[in-house]
Image (cartoon, grey):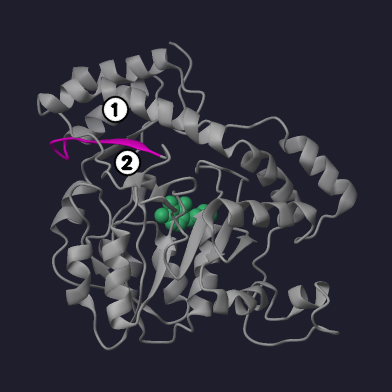
Amino acid sequence: MSSSIRFNATHLIGKEMDYVAQACLERLSGDGRFTRQCHDWLERKTGTARALLTHSCTAALEMAALLLDIAPGDEIIMPSYTFVSTANAFVLRGGIPVFVDVREDTINLDERLIEAAITSRTRAIAPVHYAGVACEMDTIMAIADRHGLAVVEDAAQGVGASYRGRALGSIGTLGAYSFHETKNIIAGEGGALLVNSPDMVLRAEVIREKGTDRAQFFRGEVDKYTWREIGSSYLPSELIAAFLWAQFEEEEAINRARLAVWDNYHQAFAGLEASGRLRRPIVPDECRHNGHMYYVLLPEAAQRQVVIGALAAAGIQAAFHYVPLHSSPAGEKFGRSHGDMTVTDDIWQRIVRLPLSPGLRSADQVRIVEILASCT
Ligand SMILES: *Cc1c(COP(=O)(O)O)cnc(C)c1O
């Protein structure tokens, strides 16, 4: 049998080890030269007021919940079709995730359903840009403005993607990125918080540094540092930042290569879609995605195991995705749904994600498409 094709083959630039070696000689703990370079790069790239590296996107979301002073009983509107961290970050503060259904086309939070889910306890909306394709942000921001709500963008999958020319993560009050190994730009584990409201920047630095004003102390803005408020340790070591810097330097090339693979799949599946045997991803005109994920929706849930099994038999890893949070044990315990979850309950059972990495060969893509054609 031919060699196996991984769902997500780790893509290294080659300079990661050099930079990590430099960090070893210069400084190991966080907020050194490489972290500063990463912050500057993110700020230039996204236009955010302040970018702060964290040890994960999960950590960035937890910082967002702290920054917004989420208290027990506060409600946060979000999709159910998302990763657990979107909800967990707020539940840790006693917040209540209020799950709303997703759109049929993008599988993103359905902006038409948000307003009806708002109550006197609603504090924030947490849109998730699934597959690096933006939510309908103009509408979501307008709703948030009308009701005085914060917007926390879970842009874990959205590094390098944009909505009407604006970087994902830089549009809401706060945005969170992931540099987990499974994302486009990687550091093993890693993330960043984009603080888009200038008035939140100092508090964000304090929360990230165990609740102290250590960052200001190192800039010479205060003469000693002390405990200011609740916080934790959210900064990654310089080893992570050094690794990440090598990836940042090649971000455009990495995303370009992923987009080429994505486009290749998209063309190859046009015929199967035309004959109703699957549905391809839909990217609205105002969204520029980053080739994070290629998925297909099968007509029937029962076909999914057949397809994944046929690919596995050929040594090809494909994957389904989230079990909706509203139907998970913790989602039932800590959250509630607003309205029915018709689209979520349907789509999660029919989705298959295909291997996508910058080095995936087109010959391998041809094989993948052939196997799908043979069993759909
Ligand atoms: C990957 C992911 C996260 C978590 O990222 P980590 O860096 O692993 O904490 C959160 N939300 C979404 C939508 C993700 O895809």
Give residue 336's position: percent from left, percent from top: 25, 74
Query: Which residue position holds label 1?
Result: 266
Rendered residue at 63%/32% (across/down): 12
Give residue 92's position: percent from left, percent from top: 47, 76
- Asked whether the viewer can see residue 357, the reply is no
Query: Which residue position holds label 2?
Result: 320
Image height check: is 24 above or below 376?
below
On the image, which quarter does residue 298 sit in?
top left
Residue range in magenta is 293-302
Give residue 308's position: percent from left, percent from top: 30, 30
Label pair 1/2, CB-CB below 8 angstroms: no
Going by the numbered disc 2, the residue's amino acid type is: Phe
Q: Main secondary structure of the magenta part?
A: loop
Indicate which label's residue lies in the foreground, 1 or 2: 1
Q: Is residue 295 magenta?
A: yes
In depth, the one of 38 and 333 nearer the eye is: 38
